[in-house]
Amino acid sequence: MTSLTEASARRGTRNPGEPARPSPAGRRRVALTRYLLPWLFLLPALILFAVFKFVPMVRAIEMSFHEVRPYLGDRWVGFDNYTAVVTDEAFRSAIWHTVVLAAGQTGGSLLLGLVLALLLEGTARHLWFVRTAVFLPTVAAMAVVAEVWRVIYYPAPEGIANSILGWAGMGPSPFLNSEDTSLWSVMAVGVWRGAPYDMMIFIAGLAGVDRTLYEASAADGAGPLRRLWHVTLPSLRPVFAILFTLAAIRGLRVFTEIFLLTNGGPNGSTEVLMTLIYKLGLERNELGVAAAGSMVLLGATVVLTLAVQALRRREA
């Protein structure tokens, strides 16, 4: 039997019971099919992304170097649009408001989300209901959220927020109607809406913390605050990096709450980069300058993401 097998191998044939081996052309065909099949399933989504995202992005980059003149033809202006973005007082003010709002919303949502996660961590049956109730602001439509907060911020003494301030012995506040308080009022809405999302990510991170570290630190006499500082927070460092990136990008791209609550007012005190780009492009028809502003925002987002990733690799 062995001699027959060896003889068949030398002749390049196979035994009757041995499965047929595919030819090189057949193997290439199978490999090609395995490679192309996933892309075939992804093709509809890729077409939608190309039409509604990548092609407009390339067009925006092109527009940022032109004075866009519909029906007359675009005129090349080089970096003049970017110079206008950097030197214009309205743009500088909008950039400053964007940075302040992004920093405040990022820090506030991370801190509040961590506190909520620590309070609602566990496996008790009733916690699912509380977590669902707390998470509702994240899934609610921003138009509904903005309208609810407009009612809460009603500037009269009988408004909801002013009534609560009155119980604490504080005077009524104009909230959205004052240049001094409007940006902080919008920031509070962003923190209130973003904290539940951060809470859920923190809860997932807390589930992965090694419980033996808590037991060991408790045996060494560490109290709750020391266990939080020396065990919980270091274990959540990767979660903090991810949430910081997401929250910062969310803060830099803030638009809907500003547009619905104040539309950049009063007197531009809440004007951010996104609302200014919207007004320049769709209300004043300065599409080239608006495209340059959007490219500046895109660059800031990319730099922030790369910086966080580099910091994570360095720490790792």
Image (spheres, rainbow, N blue to C red):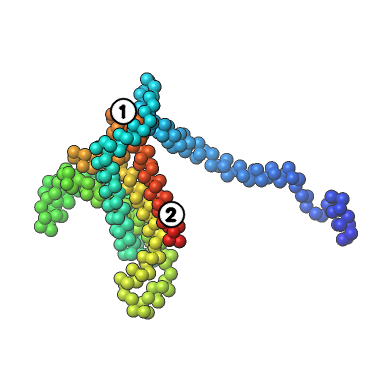
Kind of residue sitting beneath label 2: Ala
- In percent of width and height, residue 25 lies at 73, 42
Which residue is located at x 31 percent, y 75 percent?
223
Tell me which numbered mark, 1 or 2, is placed earlier along the sequence: 1
Q: Nearer the viewer, residue 277 or 90?
A: 90
Q: Is 60 located above or below residue 19 in the figure?
A: above
- Judged left or right of residue 55, residue 226 is left
Q: Nearer the viewer, residue 244 or 211?
A: 244
**Which marked residue is nearer to the observer: mark 1 or mark 2?**
2
Question: Quadrant of the image for the N terminus?
Answer: bottom right
Instruction: Residue 253: tell me if it is visible.
Output: yes
Tell me if mark 2 has few (under 14), some (14-19) or many (20+) residues whose alpha carbon lies within 10 angstroms of its own.
few
Where residue 211 sits, quadrant-wise, is: bottom left
- Judged left or right of residue 127, residue 184 is left
Kind of residue sitting beneath label 1: Asn
- In percent of width and height, residue 172 lies at 12, 50
- In percent of width and height, residue 185 lies at 21, 48
Where residue 57 sits, quadrant-wise, is: top left
Which residue is located at x 26 percent, y 45 percent?
96
Q: Which residue is mark 1?
A: 285
Which residue is located at x 88 percent, y 55 percent?
7
Badge 2 marks a residue whose secondary structure is helix
- In percent of width and height, residue 147 lies at 24, 43
- What is the number of the mark on residue 310? 2
Question: Quadrant of the image for the C terminus?
Answer: bottom left
Q: Nearer the viewer, residue 254 or 194?
A: 254
- What is the number of the mark on residue 152? none
Where residue 272 sits, quadrant-wise, is: top left
Q: How far apart, in angstroms, are the residues tagged by discs 1 and 2?
A: 39 Å
Instruction: Residue 56: tell me if it is visible.
Output: no
Tell me if mark 1 has few (under 14), some (14-19) or many (20+) residues whose alpha carbon lies within 10 angstroms of its own.
some
